Every structure is written in C-alpha cells, then in structure tokens.
Image (cartoon, grey):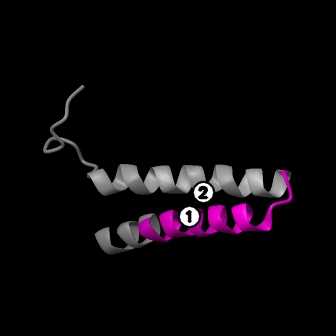
Amino acid sequence: MNRHFQDSERGPWDFIMFGATFFGFVFALGGVTVASAGVAITGLIAMGLGLVFFGLQAWLSD
C-alpha cells in the first residue's frame, strides 16, 4: 500500500471525516434500531460534522 499521499488528490482529513460520516450514519441507524437516544444523537452529530466538512470543502474549492 502506498503510504505517500503527495500524489493523491485527497488528504488524510478526507479519509478521517469520511470515516466519521460513515460511522455516524451507522451509529444513528443503530441508535434508532435499539431505541437508544444517546447513541442516535451521537451518530447524528458525527454524521453532521462530516457532512459540514465536505460541504465547506466543496464550497471553498470553487
């Protein structure tokens, strides 16, 4: 695996925030499934943080 990100268009924060968005969605879905408000809210916060990051990144790149 190539560990050098110089040739990549995506930086390490893109991968970190994609993970936060994905696992936020999974936690939100799991929290709703087992009726745990705390887990669902935590998942929604993580998912929202990731989506805001990608939205700002797309907006600022134009």
Would you say the magenta stretch is mainly helix, strand or loop? helix
Q: Residue at 15%, 41% (x, y): give it.
A: 7
Residue 36, magenta (yes or no): yes
| Residue type beneath disc 2 | Gly
Question: Which image quarter is the C terminus in?
Answer: bottom left
Would you say the residues marked 1 and 2 are in contact, meaning their CB atoms lie under 8 Å apart? yes
First in sequence: mark 1 or mark 2?
2
Residue 38 position within the rendered picture, expressed as x and y whole percent measured from the top left: 73, 67
- Name the residue nearer the viewer: 51 or 28: 28
Rendering quarter of residue 28? bottom right
Residue 2 position within the rendered picture, expressed as x and y whole percent measured from the top left: 20, 29
Q: CA distance from mark 1 to mark 2?
A: 5 Å
Which residue has dot 1 on it? 46
Relative to 32, residue 58 above or below: below
Residue 42 placement, left or right of 11: right
User: Could you say whether the residue bearing mark 1 is in a helix, strand or loop?
Assistant: helix
- Name the residue nearer the viewer: 9 or 39: 39
Q: Which residues make up the magenta segment?
A: 34-53
| Residue type beneath disc 1 | Ala
Question: How many marks on residues?
Answer: 2
